[in-house]
């Protein structure tokens, strides 16, 4: 029998999960789906072998993804994988995947889904539940594994995790005689010191991804969470309007107001800031680990370094947990091959390859302690600490609406068009309307 999904759109807390699991047993297609989706039972029938597609965002690794796929194709010539690259921007990637699902197209087989999309894609039955016994092992970082679960079932197998870290221009700090900062006040002092040097007077300070897109949600959340604020509690109640959230947002606003965060960052996405950093126009950059490989190629290890994001007012910085998971389309005709590919794509060999060639953060804890990996990537302990302290974005079935509300409310604040109090109050109203 068909039933509507529960009105509450957030899957947080064991009691809520249990209730929703029971409701899902007789649920039809979720809200926002196009057409009638197949049932979970039939979608999870892993039969059918043959060619499949791997669909992800733009490959910034200079062909390393295709090279790995070529290895698969040599091993399994009757089950070849074709790489389909989508936009470099997360919002556009998500829309392309949704468009394909809503037309019930079999053009996409295995898809890369941001971990915050798992609930939405699972609830709408655009991806199928995966056999956990075939995919889980004790080496997977538990918090990373949890990102693939919806109502206690695995719908997205993690293949790369993420947590933000701070890249810094080692050469400029050394020129100014400044140690790597560990606090927000020290970051500002370091910026002042480098700007006092001839030729660096106008260097950008601390950059991030503050354009009005998913990057703003990630970056602004970090300031709010670091100050002790939150968007929701464990029961899914809106909690954003708090003194802590206002204080965290105010720190971010002041960074722009005082010139320590460059106004250009209001239009920056990941690659914009990386280009500024590598060209010498930015001293510190809040970014994902993949940048390490790019910096090594463009700058060399003598010109940059990696550190944890700075504490603010004595509080440890709370990074945003990122990462991508493998989902298998409900409309794939070759689900047996798709599952075999997911197993191979998330194996230790593949995880090591992705770390070595693209500096993607691995899902396996052992690689953060591997002596060979530590010699190549000495920042791995810093990254693991960041992962362990990171906080995920809301697990929302309607995550697209939630992140749009966050961006609509907070972007005017970082532009200094509204106060922190006004922005947080507006966001509270918007989030409650979505609950």
Image (tube, rainbow, N blue to C red):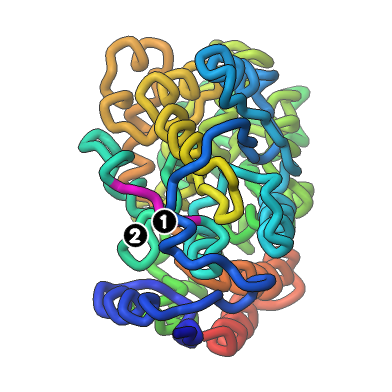
The one nearer the camera, 286 or 144, is 144
**Residue at the disc numbered 2:** 153
- Magenta segment main secondary structure: loop
Q: Tell me whether the residue at label 1 lies in contact with that at label 2, contact meaning CB atoms closer than 8 angstroms.
A: yes
The one nearer the camera, 1 or 250, is 1
Q: In this picture, is 176 found above or below 221? A: above
Few, some or many residues within 10 Å of mark 2 (<14, 14–19, 20+): some
Q: State the residue at coordinates (64%, 75%).
A: 32
Is residue 379 rendered magenta in the image? Answer: no
Q: Residue 9, percent across and down?
A: 48, 79
**Residue at the disc numbered 1:** 129
Q: Residue 336, percent across and down?
A: 46, 39
Q: State the residue at coordinates (24%, 37%).
A: 137
Q: State which quadrant residue 398 falls in.
A: bottom right
Is residue 131 rendered magenta in the image? Answer: yes
Q: Residue 344, percent across and down?
A: 43, 27
Regarding residue 322, the answer to whether it shows in the image is: yes
Kind of element beneath mark 1: loop
Could you tell whether 80 is left or right of 397 in the image?
Answer: right
Q: In this picture, is 298 found above or below 12? A: above
Could you tell whether 93 is left or right of 345 in the image?
Answer: right
User: Which circle's residue, 1 or 2, is located before the other in the chain?
Assistant: 1
């Amino acid at each position: 029998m068909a039933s509507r999904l529960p009105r509450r759109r957030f899957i947080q807390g064991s009691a809520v999960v249990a209730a929703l699991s029971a409701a899902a047993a007789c649920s039809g297609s979720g809200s926002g789906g196009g057409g009638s989706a197949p049932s979970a039972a039939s979608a999870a029938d892993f039969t059918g072998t043959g060619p499949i597609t791997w669909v992800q965002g733009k490959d910034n690794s200079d062909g390393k993804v295709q090279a790995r796929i070529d290895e698969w194709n040599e091993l399994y010539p009757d089950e070849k994988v074709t790489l389909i690259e989508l936009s470099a921007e997360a919002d556009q990637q998500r829309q392309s995947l949704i468009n394909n699902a809503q037309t019930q197209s079999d053009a996409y087989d295995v898809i890369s889904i941001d971990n915050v999309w798992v609930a939405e894609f699972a609830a709408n039955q655009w991806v199928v539940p995966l056999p956990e016994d075939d995919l889980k092992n004790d080496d997977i970082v538990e918090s990373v594994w949890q990102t693939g679960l919806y109502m206690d079932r695995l719908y997205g197998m993690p293949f790369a995790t993420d947590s933000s870290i701070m890249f810094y221009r080692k050469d400029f700090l050394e020129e100014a005689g400044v140690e790597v900062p560990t606090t927000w006040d020290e970051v500002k002092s370091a910026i002042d010191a480098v700007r006092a040097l001839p030729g660096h007077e106008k260097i950008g300070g601390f950059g991030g991804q503050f354009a009005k897109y998913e990057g703003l949600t990630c970056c602004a959340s970090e300031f709010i969470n670091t100050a002790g604020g939150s968007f929701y509690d464990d029961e899914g109640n809106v909690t954003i309007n708090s003194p802590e959230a206002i204080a965290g947002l105010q720190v971010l606003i002041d960074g722009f107001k005082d010139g320590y965060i460059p106004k250009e960052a209001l239009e920056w996405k990941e690659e914009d800031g990386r280009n500024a950093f590598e060209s010498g126009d930015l001293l510190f950059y809040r970014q994902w680990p993949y940048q390490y490989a790019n910096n090594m190629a463009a700058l060399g290890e003598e010109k940059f370094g990696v550190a944890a994001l700075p504490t603010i007012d004595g509080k440890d910085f709370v990074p945003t947990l990122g990462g991508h998971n493998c989902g298998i389309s409900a409309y794939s005709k070759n689900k047996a091959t798709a599952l075999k590919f997911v197993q191979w794509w998330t194996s230790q060999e593949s995880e090591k390859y992705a770390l070595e060639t693209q500096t993607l953060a691995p899902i396996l804890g052992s690689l953060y302690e591997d002596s060979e990996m530590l010699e190549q990537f000495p920042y791995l302990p810093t990254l693991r600490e960041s992962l362990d302290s990171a906080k995920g974005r809301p697990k929302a079935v309607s995550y697209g609406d939630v992140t749009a509300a966050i961006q609509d409310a907070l972007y005017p604040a970082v532009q200094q068009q509204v106060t922190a109090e006004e922005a947080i109050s507006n966001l509270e109203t918007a989030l409650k309307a979505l609950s």
